[in-house]
Image: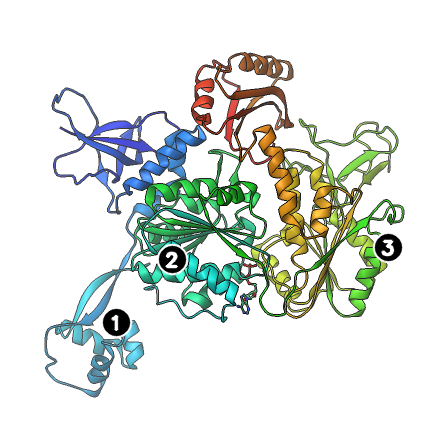
Amino acid sequence: MKIARVMFTLPLPEPFDYEVPDDFDVVPGSYVRVPLGPNERTGVVWDVFENAEEARDLKSVYMVYPAPPMPKSVRDFVDWSARYTCSNPGAVLRMVLRVPSALVPSRTQTVLEKGNAEVARMTPARARVLELIDQFPPLTAAELAQEAGVSTSVVKGLADQGVLSRSERLIDMPYEMPAPLDGVHALTDEQSEAADLLRQRVRGDAFSVTLIDGVTGSGKTEVYFEAIAEVLTSHPQGQVLILLPEIALTQAIMKRFEARFGAKPTEWHSGLSDAERRRAWREVAHGRARIVIGARSALFLPFPNLKLAVVDEEHDGSFKQEEGVIYHARNLCVARAKFEAFSVILASATPALESLHNAQQGRYGYVKLAARPGASRLPDVSLVDLRSDPPERDEWLSPVLARAMAENLEAQEQSLIFLNRRGYAPLVICKACGDRLTAPGTHNWLTEHRYTGRLVCHLTGFSMRRPSACPKCGARDSLMGVGPGIERVAEEIRRKLPQARLELLSSDTVQSGDDIRALIHRMETGQIDVLIGTQMIAKGHNFPGLTLVGVVDADASLKGGDLRAGERTFQLLSQVAGRAGRADKPGRAMLQTYQPEAPLMVALAGSDRDSFLAVEDEMRDVMGMPPHGRLAALILSFPDDQEAARLAREIGMMAPNAESVDVWGPAPAPISLLRGRYRWRFLVRADLNVDLSAYMSAWRKALKLPAQARLQIDIDPYSF
Ligand code: ADP
């Protein structure tokens, strides 16, 4: 008896066995339909084996989908990812098989090609059709008739006689990828050298990782395009994946790809409709999609022939998925590359400490782009000391920055003001009773939004109309917004520069991709004088007329104080500052800070990243933290306050003893109350030679917890 071991997209600990009927063609990787409990489900065959004993009473496979089997390397990657992230393989498989309906074959249509029969009686109309038939790929009768300028009956007549032959074509069969076009720019010497090295590294069928470390605007994209072109030419079936932070999936980059490669890449992100998703999945699984651009989840698509993955802005926090299977797409991409022997290119102006460390150790190749091409120069970064140059009461822009903005407006150049706080005020207090308004069931402050007239919790999504009286003491007109959000700073700018054309960009002020694109277009074409925004404006856009960047609160993201806060702040602020000055206009950036002497600020002002990172790296080394050690987090959540604390202590006592592993906690998690659940956290540090995933899984296995308790394991936590 032939038995198939089937994995489902369900969080089950084990695959299930099914009997394979004799006439079914089932191989490892086949997608099958099988009974499960009272239902039917789609699953993937993980393994096939013969069982001589015939004794087992198994249910049978119902159906095999006519889709290419999932390659072994992809199944191995699923197994490995599950183990690494301490998840069930089924939960990982669910990310690969996001659209089971994509397995059903798509509709077909009839197309015509040259047939065998000779034409019996030639007419001018028939001659026109026959002239054309070799010049096009197979077309439908209607398409062919239109091209030839004849009626469809002429075409059909030829097909009936066998002069044209009919065949079936999948409707969503996409273009053949045309040969890459030439690069748009002549590369600079530095860029050519980088491109040569990359081409060499991506040419073979070997695992490799290369880091492109280049200042914003130095041509990183231009250079990795060369590597992509190399892969497309040297591997006629090869596929290329480009992972971008979700936010950067703008049409601008799609257009650049189209201009360079002659066809639109396949997109994969949360904005797709079901039909688009189905189609994209099928194109990838059948190997027809040669270039795929996507957000982090595109990493799990079942590419049969992936040859190169590019992770652009590799340091970006949005590559970390924090729910369900918790993973970092950059890290898992490198892991997948090992299973499938392909090349990875990481690109960033501010690479993660981990990636730089790997490059220094020789594990990754390294390419540096130090200059912007042509006359374009890096912005001049200066610090504004808020202690000696403070803003007026209830204002947030210091006189120096305000003056620079006024001068810029005078010179008809654009300014960008960055503040990573949505809304009007990040905190609302009652002047009568002193209460700070929080979202129900949490300790999170409510943010005041004037644009929508609401108070909003940015963590839970809770929102309410701004009340006219304090919900606690009932005093009327006593509520007051404290601190600045971008709406409030916009108000100040309107007061100071009433003639400026001012716009706001945050997730509250623009709703759809179309809104964002329209706003970006207005900025690109000089229809905006001052743009104020949150981190949505930090990356990915080139604004040729932008010459001044002002950062309202450069200290903001340092306040959380976790291990990576310094590194992250440096990355964010360099990125924001890098928006200023492109093409022929020099730019400048002004950072408002209360601690201009802090090493991070000094490094930003001197554009001296390397000495800042050297200090960070040394600190991590001393503490045995990544990249010099491993880190994981365990988070318990429970609906009751007291019981949560008690359970957390109990979990702590069950932590296995292991050499070179330190367990810290329990401590209240950074978000200590979320959706009515109290959260406690352990941080676990280990030396590099420890299998920390195995340790965490063993710990979880040893626990017996009440049903309402929830545990989350986060390997390589990004913020903590
Ligand atoms: P990065 O990815 O490093 O930010 P890009 O590849 O986006 O840099 O290049 C920045 C800008 O400079 C783009 O508008 C690009 O078209 C242009 N550019 C890049 N290389 C050259 C070159 N060799 N000559 C002229 N323009 C270039």
Which comes sooner in the sequence, label 3 or label 2? 2
Residue 148 visible within the image: yes
Query: Residue flagged by tag 1: what amino acid is it?
Result: Ala
Q: Quadrant of the C terminus?
A: top right
User: SS for tag 2?
Assistant: helix
**Mark whose residue sits in front, 3 or 1:** 3
Residue 131 percent location from the top left of the image: 22, 82
Is residue 500 positioned above or below 512 on the image? below
Q: Mark 2 = which residue?
A: 200
Residue 557 percent location from the top left of the image: 69, 41
Distance of mark 3 from mark 1, alpha carbons?
71 Å
Q: Mark 1 = which residue?
A: 141
Q: Do the residues under discs 3 and 1 have CB atoms within 8 angstroms?
A: no
Query: Is 189 or 561 nearer to us in this picture?
Result: 189
Query: Is 569 or 283 nearer to us in this picture?
Result: 569
User: SS for tag 3?
Assistant: helix
Residue at 64 percent across and 17 percent down: it is 641
Which comes sooner in the sequence, label 3 or label 1? 1
Residue 210 percent location from the top left of the image: 45, 50
Residue at 29 percent across and 42 percent down: it is 70
Query: Residue flagged by tag 3: what amino acid is it?
Result: Pro
Question: Which of the labelled discs sits on residue 399, or is there none?
Answer: 3
Image position of 407 (left or right of 107): right
Mark 1 Cα within 10 Å, few/some/many (few <14, many 20+)? many
Question: Which of the labelled discs sits on residue 50, or is there none?
Answer: none
Q: Quadrant of the N terminus?
A: top left
Residue 61 percent location from the top left of the image: 22, 33
Is residue 716 positioned above or below 202 on the image? above
